[in-house]
Image (tube, rainbow, N blue to C red):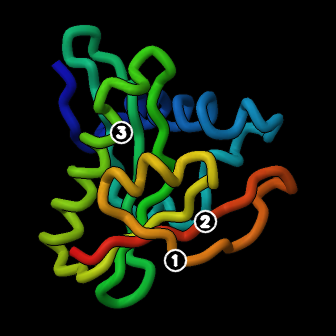
Amino acid sequence: MIVIRTPSTKEEFKAYYALRYKILREPLGQPHGSEKDDYEPISIHFAAVDDQKDEIIGAVKLFEKEPGVGQYSHIAVAEAYQHKGVGRMLIQAVEQKARELGYKKLGTLTRLTSTGFYERCGYRAVGITGVLFGKLQMMWMEKDL
């Protein structure tokens, strides 16, 4: 069974960041460390865990972008678990927490190739924001909560 929880041990955070690197940065030839940003300390981290294997198979983090507006980023799902609902589970957990925190809007910065997934989750494209690592066109998408 897949459960969503916050990583709590040093080993869990190590696996959490390793997954983010493997899925989001390694394919782009980015160095280790690029899977983290300045918002790590103020973020709430969520891990999808295959509890039968005790393995972290998904990751995402949430932080307050501005008063009443949450942003989540670095959503990653292990290749063997993609297209099986894990990403949707992570987003649902983030949305639930954002509502608990009183956020009225939630957004994410995503690759253009992923916009269809977010649209199916109820997000709308607001604008193109630039290019990441000189390779990826990025889109800001948001949803009213």
- Is the C-beta separation of discs 3 and 1 under 8 Å? no
Between circles 2 and 3, the one closer to the viewer is: 2
Q: Which residue is mark 3?
A: 87
Image quarter of residue 80 = top left
Image spot of residue 96 (x, y percent): 16, 60
State whether residue 57 is above or below residue 8. above
Real-space Cα separation, disc 3 to disc 1, in angstroms: 21 Å
**Looking at the picture, which amino acid does disc 2 mark?**
Met
Residue at image coords 29%, 31%: 85
The crowd level at tag 1 (other Cα within 10 Å; few <14, some 14-19, many 20+) is few
**SS class, disc 1:** strand
Q: Please give the name of the residue rendered at 56% of the width and 57% of the height, measured from the top-left corner.
A: 110
| Numbered disc 3: secondary structure | helix
The tag earlier along the polypeptide, 2 or 3, is 3
Residue that extends furthest to the right in the rendered view of this protein: 134
Percent position of residue 39, x then y: 52, 66
The residue singled out by tag 2 in the image is 139
In the image, taking residue 20 as reference, residue 124 lies left or right, namely left
Mark 1 sits on what residue? 126
